[in-house]
Image: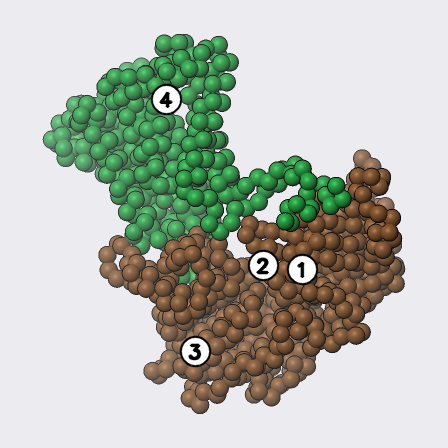
């Protein structure tokens, strides 16, 4: 590699040799959105760097440029002081960079070893025995527990992640990037992963872990680099900082949540669930004898590790997923009792049980991406009125009301909601659900991916509903929020209720424990 | 240049929220038609002819005289009707490629009525009864795959395609068997069973223009149209909103088949005056092109079906006058489809060529 074409000076080269990889002035735009704005970052060998930032702060985008998924619009990447260009994942591997993506990229019907060697250039004939042996060797070295001949479809999430990590190590990566590796792991699995990461650090590898969980940052990293809204805020030594300071860097101001939590004195039983058991398409038991009551005039939080049955619980109540056993009884404010199991979503909806269900893919359910706000408001009312024609005036008025009340940022109420930002999409959905004055309002991950201000807007809306006497069921992932927003918290673990706690007195540790262990006592 | 990084020569970027202005969008679309016609020149050159002369002959052959124009419109009528029929299916992302069979089914039913009721009924009730029978059988022919899709989630593409061959086989049997008049042909209709002429063309043109209005209103302003649009966008959202997706699918497929059946009636009664296994003549497939090029807009379908009508009539003339294979019109149609669909890509994305110097300049 000659010096001429790149023209860096000798001194410059010396200065940056301490980094295995260095990013300088990296900018990436997606259309008008600046995802990364002139970011400088260095990754050193034998060091774990936590890349911290809120959802949407540009962490994954930045690392994807190292992994060869995206190409930076501006700026340059230096490897051991020399400028390089990474135009494909293959280039990335050639430079010793391997990324473990948040969504695993594995072939289900292949074994671990087959997945690991997939896409590698080598001899014409694949020697799977040799590959198996090499996989075993890597596993022994770092303490992975994985059978190279096991098929991916038989694996747990944690095993799949292990395969991804081994895949990267198999390609002799010296720089490992892990994108939110703990999001799907239990605490024990997380501990095991961290032990492996430490071993790799001893092996003089440069490790980046993308996360927005502060406790993990403190537990595992040597340095923390913080991004905020696509901008690089700074890097600090983990030993010299604390979660409070990091939060300040991350959100730009100190966050004491201070969610307003008035007590509604008029609470009444609104929904009684008992013995609810649900199987998914693959006949896997997702809910196992779940029972609880939801009161009008309170926010019932639902906590649990991702995939503990939260989605199925809400869908079963809304009539969107078949119930194997158990009952869901709706107790209307005007008296009486209605069994919801066996009713269609429309019948349930008409009773006032509203699902503002916001799954991972917001537009996948609840909204019509190609339509504007008016069309989406119509999803509630399109059947109204006699005759074959839809009435647009009322939904249009509602769209304008939501637009003003929730400050939705959109070029117009007919602008396709697909093209709006996540927060605005959320506002459209929640605004519509609340407008129908439900007596039970269910939300899942209502604030995922939203900025702080929008999140507070959503919290306030939930509380407003609660004070009106609505039974709010709030499935959340951030325990701090659950503890400050809800009245009671129901904890799910492996499809079972592991406990119901009073959110005013419970501690984070208490809930954390319930999330990972079935058989806790029924509280509150 | 110190700050340069090697970028690929061409990169893609999604256009921003507001995208291109409408004028530019239409500029790109018109440009794509021009590009298709230019590429068509190459095909004509390969046949050893002068492209300009050939295009001239085609235009003259399609639009030169009143009779030519009538013939061109006659070709456009079934294309337009059938494109309107499949539009709601495509909007719903139900890939109905069985319009060919649904047309044939409609023509079969119309012919049955014409054979059994001619002489017993006056012309107008006879025609109405033929149309009704055509719509019912066409509708049923569409409903069958719709039913299986709704109940067991069968693949509608294969199913509708196979249904084409079944009904065409039935007609082939009738043609050579029970209904045979002579030499494997079915007898022509009596005059009472033929569509009357209006302005020199059978009155099918009035029917399809009425259908344009109907379909526009149906898709944009009715509850049914709304349901179809929601299902097409997200099945989960439709279920969430309490829509009975299976029923809507079956209903839409019946409607689509019924309109295709009506087109079959128009072809049988207006143009061919008999039934044969080739009665649909590929209209069911070409209309997919029409629907797609029009982006399911009912009014745009009028223009596109006329354009394809001009191409096919022009190519027929080209064959007789200059001895150029008639397939040339298919080539140009294909190029049109290719270029016009391809142009959507440039409307949604823009290409970024590698800058000669990257880095600092770009950052300003």
Name the residue that disc number 4 marks.
Answer: B312
Tags 4 and 3 on a common chain: no
Protein image colouring: by chain
Determine the chain carrying the residue at label 4. Answer: B
Residue A161 lies, in percent from the top left, at 72, 59
Please say if B111 is above or below B23: above
Would you call the spot at circle 4 few (<14 residues within 10 Å), some (14-19), or many (20 or more)? many
Tags 4 and 2 on a common chain: no
Would you call the spot at circle 1 few (<14 residues within 10 Å), some (14-19), or many (20 or more)? many
Q: Is residue A400 left or right of residue B74?
A: right
Give the CA separation, mark 4 to mark 2: 52 Å
Label 3 SS: helix
Q: What residue sits 39% from the left and 67% below the top?
A: A404
Determine the chain carrying the residue at label 2. Answer: A
Compare marks 3 and 2 and give the one earlier in the sequence.
2
Of badges 2 and 1, nearer the viewer stands 1
Name the residue that disc number 1 marks.
Answer: A59
Determine the chain carrying the residue at label 1. Answer: A
**Count of numbered circles on the image:** 4
Q: Is residue A257 left or right of residue B232?
A: right
Determine the chain carrying the residue at label 3. Answer: A
Tag shown at residue A25: none
Residue A191 lies, in percent from the top left, at 77, 70
Label 4 SS: helix
> Dividing the image into 4 quarters, which one contains the C terminus of chain A?
bottom right
Q: Quadrant of residue A203?
A: bottom right
Give the CA separation, mark 4 to mark 3: 63 Å
Name the residue that disc number 2 marks.
Answer: A282
Q: Which chain is brown?
A: A
Name the residue that disc number 3 marks.
Answer: A465
Q: Are marks 2 and 1 in contact (CB under 8 Å)?
A: no
Give the CA separation, mark 4 to mark 1: 56 Å
């Amino acid at each position: 590699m000659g010096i001429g074409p790149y023209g860096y000076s000798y001194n410059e080269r010396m200065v940056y040799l301490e980094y295995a990889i260095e990013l300088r002035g990296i900018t990436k735009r997606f259309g008008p959105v600046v995802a990364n704005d002139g970011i400088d970052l260095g990754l050193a060998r034998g060091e774990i760097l936590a890349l911290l930032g809120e959802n949407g702060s540009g962490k994954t985008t930045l690392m994807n440029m190292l992994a060869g998924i995206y190409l930076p619009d501006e700026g340059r990447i230096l490897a051991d002081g020399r400028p390089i260009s990474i135009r494909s994942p293959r280039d990335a591997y050639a430079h010793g960079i391997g990324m473990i993506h948040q969504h695993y990229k594995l072939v289900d019907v292949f074994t671990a070893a087959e997945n690991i060697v997939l896409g590698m250039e080598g001899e014409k004939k694949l020697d799977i025995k040799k590959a198996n042996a090499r996989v075993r060797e890597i596993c022994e070295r770092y303490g992975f527990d994985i059978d190279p001949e096991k098929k991916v479809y038989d694996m747990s999430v944690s095993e799949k992640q292990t395969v991804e990590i081994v895949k990267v190590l198999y390609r002799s990566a010296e720089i490992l990037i892990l994108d939110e590796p703990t999001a799907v792991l239990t605490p024990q699995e997380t501990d095991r992963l961290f032990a492996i990461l430490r071993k790799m650090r001893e092996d003089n590898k440069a490790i980046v872990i993308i996360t927005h969980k502060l406790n993990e940052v403190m537990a595992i990293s040597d340095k923390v680099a913080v991004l905020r809204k696509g901008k690089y805020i700074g890097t600090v030594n983990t030993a010299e900082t604390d979660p409070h300071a990091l939060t300040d860097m991350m959100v730009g101001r100190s966050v004491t949540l201070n969610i307003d939590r008035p007590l509604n004195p008029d609470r009444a039983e609104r929904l009684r669930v008992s013995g609810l058991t649900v199987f998914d398409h693959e006949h896997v038991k997702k809910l196992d004898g779940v029972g609880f009551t939801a009161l009008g005039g309170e926010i019932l939080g639902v906590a649990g590790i991702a995939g503990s049955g939260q989605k199925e619980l809400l869908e079963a109540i809304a009539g969107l997923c078949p119930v194997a056993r158990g009952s869901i009884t709706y107790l209307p404010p005007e008296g009486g009792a209605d069994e919801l199991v066996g009713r269609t979503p429309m019948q349930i909806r008409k009773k006032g049980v509203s699902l503002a269900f916001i799954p991972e893919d917001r537009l996948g359910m609840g909204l019509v991406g190609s339509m504007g706000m008016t069309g989406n408001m119509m999803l509630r009312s399109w059947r109204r009125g006699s005759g074959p024609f839809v009435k647009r005036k009322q939904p249009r008025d509602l769209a304008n009301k939501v637009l003003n009340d929730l400050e939705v940022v959109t070029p117009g109420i007919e602008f396709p909601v697909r093209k709006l930002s996540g927060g605005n999409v959320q506002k459209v959905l929640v605004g519509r659900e609340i407008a129908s004055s439900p007596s039970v309002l269910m939300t899942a991950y209502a604030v995922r991916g939203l900025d702080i201000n929008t999140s507070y807007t959503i919290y306030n809306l939930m509380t407003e509903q609660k004070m009106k006497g609505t039974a709010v069921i709030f499935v959340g992932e951030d325990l701090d929020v659950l503890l400050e927003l809800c009245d009671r918290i129901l904890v799910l673990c492996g499809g079972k209720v592991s406990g119901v706690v009073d959110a005013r007195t419970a501690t984070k540790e208490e809930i954390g424990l319930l999330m990972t262990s079935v058989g806790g006592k029924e509280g509150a | 240049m110190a700050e340069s990084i090697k970028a690929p020569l061409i990169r893609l970027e999604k256009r921003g929220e507001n995208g291109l202005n409408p004028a530019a969008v239409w500029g790109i679309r018109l440009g794509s038609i021009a590009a298709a016609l230019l590429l068509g020149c190459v095909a004509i050159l390969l046949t050893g002819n002068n492209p300009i002369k050939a295009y001239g002959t085609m235009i003259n052959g399609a639009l030169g005289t009143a009779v030519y124009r009538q013939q061109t419109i006659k070709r456009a009528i079934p294309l337009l009707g059938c494109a309107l029929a499949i539009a709601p299916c495509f909007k719903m992302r139900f890939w109905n490629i069985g319009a060919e069979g649904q047309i044939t089914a409609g023509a079969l039913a119309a012919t049955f009525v014409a054979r059994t009721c001619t002489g017993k009924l006056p012309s107008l009730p006879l025609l109405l009864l033929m149309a009704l029978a055509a719509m019912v059988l066409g509708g049923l022919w569409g409903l069958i795959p719709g039913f299986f899709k709704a109940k067991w989630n069968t693949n509608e593409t294969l199913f509708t395609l196979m249904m084409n061959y079944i009904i065409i086989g039935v007609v082939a049997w009738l043609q050579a068997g029970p209904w045979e008049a002579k030499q494997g042909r079915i007898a022509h209709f009596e005059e009472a069973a033929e569509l009357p002429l209006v302005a020199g063309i059978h009155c099918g043109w009035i029917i399809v223009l009425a259908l344009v209005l109907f379909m526009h209103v149906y898709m944009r302003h009715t509850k049914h149209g709304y349901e179809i649009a929601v299902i097409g966008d997200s099945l989960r959202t439709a279920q969430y909103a309490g829509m009975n997706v299976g029923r809507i699918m079956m209903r839409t497929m019946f409607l689509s088949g019924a309109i295709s059946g009506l087109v079959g009636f128009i072809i049988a009664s207006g143009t061919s005056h008999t039934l044969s296994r080739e009665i649909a003549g590929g209209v069911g497939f070409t209309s997919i092109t029409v629907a797609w090029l029009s982006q399911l807009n009912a009014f745009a379908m009028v223009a596109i079906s006329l354009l394809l009508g001009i191409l096919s009539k022009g190519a027929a003339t080209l064959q007789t006058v200059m001895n150029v294979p008639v397939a040339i019109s298919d080539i140009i149609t294909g190029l049109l489809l290719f270029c016009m669909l391809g142009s959507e890509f440039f409307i949604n994305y823009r290409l970024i060529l590698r800058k000669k110097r990257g880095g600092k300049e770009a950052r300003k």
